[in-house]
Amino acid sequence: MTGFTTTESLAAYMPEQNIDTDAIYPARYLLLMEREGLGPYLFHDRRFHGDGTPKEGFILDLEPFSKAQVLVAGAGFGCGSSREQAVWALTGFGVRCVIAPSFGEIFAGNALKNGLLTIALPEEVVARIGAAAQRGARFRIDLEECILCVDNEIVATIDLPEGQRMALLNGWDETDVLLQEEGDAISGFETRHRMAQPWLFQGST
């Protein structure tokens, strides 16, 4: 995964509440199991008619928001089923961060494991920055400083457990995190035993 340090972008505002994973990634595409290449299926039924022709007016198909890397959404974003493809579709489309008052619990976990930052903020704050998004404000998410800025004004701090923050910063997936944790445990084990029984490690590097 690509590491997440700082993202600067316009934001697309989707104020609807309880946008579920079936809206984000329709169930009939669940047989597509590869992580890459799912961006075109994002919000497919809201963007296309049954014959595949585009619908008009969907925010992510409107300029200048078609390349927005940030979504500002209503409460309950990502509720519903646990499909990980919903996250893959968002990241495949180019979305790096979703801001909402609350998220589906499983969706939020899947997001952090796949390089998608979720930021939960109070409803009044989300409404305010959503209005700014509609005006074309520039959003900056700095994960090193843990701040969210809108038009160069700090509007919120990002509260994220340090382990998850480091995983996002370094672009670590679940396997990388596991290897990192196991590597630390193995090093600690060797250090303790090297000190207790140094003769066992003579000649080792």
Image (tube, rainbow, N blue to C red):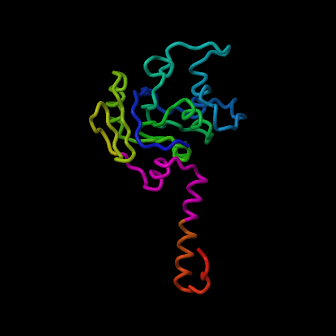
Span of residues in magenta: 158-183
Q: Quadrant of residue 185?
A: bottom right
Q: Quadrant of residue 71?
A: top left
Question: 78 or 177, which is in the foreground?
Answer: 177
| Residue that appears at 60% across and 82% down | 202
Q: Is residue 60 left or right of residue 139?
A: right
Q: Is residue 78 above or below residue 137?
A: below
Residue 41: percent from left, percent from top? 62, 27
Dominant SS of magenta comes to: helix
160 part of magenta stretch: yes
| Residue that appears at 61% across and 22% down | 45
Seen as rendered, the residue at the extreme left is: 153
**How many labels sit on residues?**
0
Seen as rendered, the residue at the extreme right is: 31
Q: Is residue 119 left or right of residue 187?
A: left
178 part of magenta stretch: yes
Q: Is residue 164 above or below residue 130?
A: below
| Residue that appears at 43% across and 26% down | 12
Question: 2 or 58, which is in the foreground?
Answer: 2
Quarter the C terminus occupies: bottom right
Question: 17 or 65, which is in the foreground?
Answer: 65
Residue 21: percent from left, percent from top? 58, 34
Quarter the N terminus occupies: top right
Residue 151: percent from left, percent from top? 29, 30
Residue 11: percent from left, percent from top? 41, 28
